[in-house]
């Protein structure tokens, strides 16, 4: 797996388009959000800013890059070449998504640390970490699933957009309006419960036991996303 | 060393939805053999290879490589090198990185430098694959396939896009690997390559074998031809040739040596000069064309 992961990391770092759109742009957006943190905090809360940062990285670095790079590797028949070796499918897939997952986690760790240093740290750090990990797992699996219906890296700009914008919209909706009125709907949407969890974790104004329940719909989304990925992902271009 | 076949395919069928791509295919490839899988476009060659490679499960029937399911990558792939029809090379990796990566996960041990020298790409080791020519990419793909000297090498149209020097070098490497005991399965559209190098050939058409055997077995299924022209005053021939244009004739025969001898003796006895005389044995191209035209008895399987 490490040889595949290293090869994939090299390819990501050498591809200027992927580097700019998927890795540098999300960081730039995050810097913009942190810079305007007081404005965002007034319409939501610091926890809301934290959740939006998490989903910005999850949507654009992790999800969009996963879709784009898997579609590119399939189009180049590189997936088939890898499958012509002794490596198993889970090893290949893990190796291919490991670099972007690592980069995303590193990005969010640095960005949230900077944000915490400037705006104030999260109250329930362990809960926040659980929310970040679950959100990333969901977005990674959804990325693999979306790659299954994406014909080419160019097509990924179309197929990845709805969910990328969708989860940020859900995070903003939940983060700004709270869940007093439409809680069941908001918690059922992808990223809805995770946003509420992370907002609670950051602000610390809800008991941990109550927030922990929000992990259930989040984990349900992770399971659903993994099931979608295993059903929708294709190793070869359609014949 | 085991005497069991390296590849065993038994009553294999492969369907894509309603399309029956491969029908009741059975064959074996013995250790050390070079087996060429030839056929018309869409005959099912690549589909057959994909089952042997473990990329596709047969709809029915059985396939075994080294006595195991070809989908058992851990057991089978470390002994098998695969050169795909389409390159499958990562554009942003260098030549050396590509061979190192594929070699590493092939489960075999080798030196990247040795393999790149083998395909004359050592000087391109630091070049990104996207900057290689089509022929260089094929050579890189071949390098990845032969990394670690696998026991079984699958070559899917290996020489397409290669210049003559590269082709010769590739076949020289294949020959060296065969001398070390490697088994080779080949598909190609260059019939002369199969005719020169294959121990046995399976000729596919419309998803099944129409002929299988050695080159000699296959070419024996069609008559050879003797062509010549006669002077206007020549006496009647002892055999019944098919007339061509003017005074030219053609004899189709399954006994080329005997009939040629008879013809020459007749010409000598009657002081007739045979102008434009030529005798041509059946070539693989003729068999191939006959299969395309469905003028060969089918299926005729010669073991």
Image (cartoon, coloured by chain):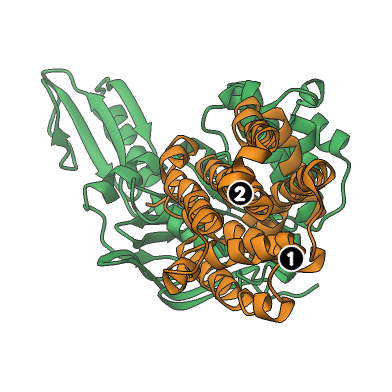
Chain colours: A orange, B green
Residue in the foreground of this view, choosing between B128 and A177: A177
Q: Residue at x 71, y 63 (%)?
A: A133
Tell me which label, 2 or 1, sits earlier in the chain: 2
Does residue B113 lie above or below A137 as drawn?
above
Q: Residue at x 26, y 47 (%)?
A: B292
Does residue B302 lie above or below B10 as drawn?
above
Q: Which residue is mark 2?
A: A52
In-image side of B219 versus A137 (left or right): left
Q: Position of residue A29 (x, y in %)?
A: 63, 34
Say if residue B283 shows up in the picture.
no
The N terminus of chain A, quarter of image: bottom right
* Pointer 1 local density, CA inside 10 Å: few below 14, some 14–19, many at least 20: some
Does residue B278 lie above or below B28 as drawn?
above
* Pointer 2 local density, CA inside 10 Å: few below 14, some 14–19, many at least 20: many
Q: Position of residue B149 (x, y in %)?
A: 79, 50
Q: Which residue is mark 1?
A: A204
Label 2 vs label 1: CA separation? 17 Å
Q: Position of residue A103 (x, y in %)?
A: 75, 45
């Amino acid at each position: 797996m490490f040889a595949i992961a290293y090869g994939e990391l090299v390819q990501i770092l050498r591809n200027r388009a992927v580097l700019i759109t998927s890795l540098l742009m999300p960081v730039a957006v995050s810097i913009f959000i942190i810079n305007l943190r007081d404005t965002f905090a007034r319409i939501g809360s610091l926890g809301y800013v934290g959740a939006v940062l998490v989903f910005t990285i999850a949507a654009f670095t992790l999800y969009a890059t996963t879709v784009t790079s898997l579609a590119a590797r399939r189009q180049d028949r590189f997936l088939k070449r890898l499958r012509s070796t002794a490596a198993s499918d889970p090893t290949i897939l893990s190796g291919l998504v490991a670099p972007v997952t690592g980069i995303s986690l590193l990005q969010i760790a640095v960005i949230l640390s900077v944000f915490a240093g400037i705006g104030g740290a999260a109250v329930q750090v362990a809960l926040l970490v659980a929310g970040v990990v679950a959100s990333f797992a969901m977005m990674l699996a959804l990325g693999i699933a979306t790659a299954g219906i994406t014909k080419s890296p160019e097509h990924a700009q179309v197929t990845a957009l709805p969910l990328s914008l969708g989860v940020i919209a859900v995070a903003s909706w939940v983060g700004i309006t709270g869940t007093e009125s439409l809680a069941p709907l908001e918690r059922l949407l992808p990223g809805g419960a995770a946003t509420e969890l992370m907002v609670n974790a950051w602000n610390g104004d809800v008991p941990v036991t109550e927030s922990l329940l929000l992990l259930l719909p989040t984990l349900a989304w992770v399971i659903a996303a993994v099931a979608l990925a295993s059903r929708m992902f294709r190793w070869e271009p359609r014949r | 060393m085991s005497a069991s076949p390296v590849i065993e395919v038994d009553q294999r069928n492969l369907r894509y939805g309603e399309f029956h791509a491969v029908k009741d295919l059975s064959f074996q490839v013995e250790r050390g053999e070079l087996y060429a899988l030839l056929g018309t476009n869409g005959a099912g060659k690549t589909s057959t290879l994909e089952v042997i490679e473990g990329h596709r499960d047969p709809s029915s029937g059985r396939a075994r490589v080294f006595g195991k399911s070809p989908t058992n990558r851990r057991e089978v792939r470390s002994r098998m090198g695969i050169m795909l029809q389409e390159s499958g090379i990562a554009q942003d990796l260098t030549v050396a990185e590509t061979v190192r990566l594929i070699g590493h996960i092939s489960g075999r041990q080798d030196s990247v430098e040795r393999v790149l020298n083998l395909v004359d790409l050592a000087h391109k080791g630091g070049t990104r694959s996207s900057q290689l020519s089509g022929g260089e990419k094929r050579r890189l793909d071949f390098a990845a396939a032969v990394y670690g000297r696998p026991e079984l090498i699958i070559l899917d149209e290996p020489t397409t896009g290669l210049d003559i020097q590269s082709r010769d070098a590739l076949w020289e490497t294949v020959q060296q690997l065969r001398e070390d005991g490697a088994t080779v399965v080949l598909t190609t559209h260059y019939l002369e390559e199969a005719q020169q190098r294959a121990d046995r050939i399976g000729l596919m058409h419309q998803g099944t074998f129409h002929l299988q055997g050695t080159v000699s077995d296959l070419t024996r299924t069609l008559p050879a031809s003797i062509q010549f022209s006669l002077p206007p005053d020549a006496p009647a021939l002892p055999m019944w040739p098919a007339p061509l244009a003017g005074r030219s004739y053609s004899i189709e025969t399954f006994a080329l040596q005997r009939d040629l001898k008879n013809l020459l003796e007749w010409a000598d006895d009657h002081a007739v000069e045979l102008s434009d005389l030529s005798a041509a044995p059946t070539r693989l191209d003729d068999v191939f064309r006959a299969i395309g035209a469905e003028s060969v008895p089918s299926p005729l399987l010669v073991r």
